[in-house]
Amino acid sequence: MNTNPGVARHHIISVLVENKPGVLARVSGLFARRGYNIFSLAVAPTDDDRRSRITIVVDVESAPLEQIVKQLDKLINVLRIDELAPGDAVERELLLATVESPQATRQGFAVQVEVAGARILDAGADTVTVSLEGTPDELDRFAILLATHPVVALQRTGRVALPKIG
């Protein structure tokens, strides 16, 4: 979690690549060889199935942005690199969590989930699985709310981001 919201701790790099075997391994290997700490990494095909977009969030302290971009640009399957400043990007993550929620307190928990903008995906006898899609800060706040209940499992996808238009 970002304990100082006024300070950007991460670089967001959007890399358009050819959708070929081994490209992700080459990109992530570059970061490993240079000792850069990847905070999150998400990859998926674009609207053109010949291309994929890799969104990499890198710890500012471990990686000088200019050096990262130069190294990525040398990789053969890299088509385009966009550096996304947090204010210039639309960012989203997905959080899934299973928490203990006995039937006796389920309705109150469901209200908390709804107020947070999350959804209940599955409910068992004593557990509930919820999801929230939002900005990293929104997910951080939701995780704090969830911590008031016994969390069985929690998973975040990592950031995906695109430049803002206009």
Image (cartoon, rainbow, N blue to C red):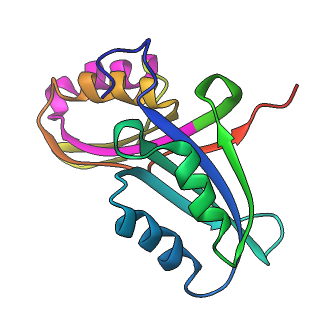
Q: Is residue 47 left or right of residue 75?
A: right
Which residue is at 35% across, 27% downward?
140
* Relative to 155, 15 lies left or right: right
Among all residues in the image, which is located at the extreme top? 6
User: In the rendered view, would you say 89 is above or below 35?
Assistant: above
Does the magenta-highlighted stretch encompass residue 58? Answer: no
Provide residue 21's location: percent of width, then percent of height: 59, 88
Percent position of residue 154, x then y = 26, 47
The residue sitting at the left extreme is 150
Taking the magenta stretch, the answer to whether it contains residue 105 is yes
Residue 111 versus residue 47: which sits nearer the camera?
47
Q: How far across and down, in percent of the image, does residue 48 sit?
A: 83, 70
**At 44% from the left edge and 11% from the top edge, which residue is drawn?**
6
**Image coordinates for residue 155, horizontal then vertical, percent:** 32, 50
48 shown above or below 104: below
Locate the N terminus by quadrant: top left
Q: What range is drawn magenta here?
A: 92-115
| Residue 32 drawn above or below residue 12 | below
